[in-house]
Amino acid sequence: MIKNIILDFGHGGLDKKGKYTTRGKKHKFPNGEWAYEGVLNRQIGGMIQAYFRAHGTRYNVVTTVGADDSRDLSLGYRVRVANKFKPSETIFISIHCNAFNSKARGFEIFTSRGTTKSDAIAESIANSIEPYYKELKLRLRYNFSDGDKDKEADFYVLRKTRCPAVLLECLFFDNREDFDNLKNPEFQKELSWRIYQGIQSYIEKN
């Protein structure tokens, strides 16, 4: 039975002086507007946390860093937060946004390599998000080579967590169209709700 949900908001945020605490993970558009991945991660992840609180969840929802905490905590620390809990009772969800060449777009969800318990979490979240992204004509960057939608990677937070873990790349923050969605509070609200529902659906089925 799942008792602990670890929400990880990737990278750092803007401190009280308006300084971004992460090297890189930001993009300046031609109009002078800046996109900060860590800020978006906190906005989306904080809403997921709020949905769990609002619905009287019986789960222990833990964040590796607070939504209002701008620090860029180490990957090792983030993993240690998750590994404090019994693996069979815990899941780890890391919230990110992607960047590449300002042209790439879309949603990705990652698990560690091989067939693991993480695959079912990824599938549940992807299935929950998919109808909304299709409605907005946003790209879904899946990998069906092993029969499911997740991509596999050796990301540290996926390899080192002892519990099932997934990492979401919600959209590409260096792409103008994707970023316009990512910064939209209504989009954030709906995306966060669907991630929340995907997590809940997984838990109910398992």
Image (cartoon, rainbow, N blue to C red):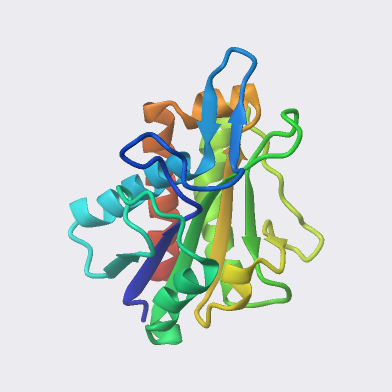
Q: Position of residue 120 (x, y in %)?
A: 57, 68
Residue depicted at 53% across the width and 65% down the height: 121
Location of residue 159 with respect to 69 vertically, above or below: below
The quadrant of the picture occupied by the C terminus is: bottom left
The answer to whether residue 206 is visible is no
- At 72% from the left and 73% from the top, the residue drawn is 113
Report which quarter residue 144 is drawn in: bottom right
Q: Where residue 12 sits in the image (x, y, percent)?
A: 46, 50
Residue 106 horizontal/vertical position (percent): 66, 37
- Asked if residue 153 is positioned above or below residue 83 in the image, the reply reads above
Q: Is residue 160 left or right of residue 101?
A: left
Q: Nearer the viewer, residue 117 or 153?
A: 153
Judged left or right of residue 50, residue 132 is right
Total of numbered circles in the picture? 0
Return the x and y of residue 14 as percentages of the image width and height.
40, 40
**In this view of the protein, which residue sits in the foreground, 16 or 106?**
16
Kindly identify the residue that appears in the image at 33 percent across and 51 percent down: 69
Quadrant hosting residue 64: bottom left
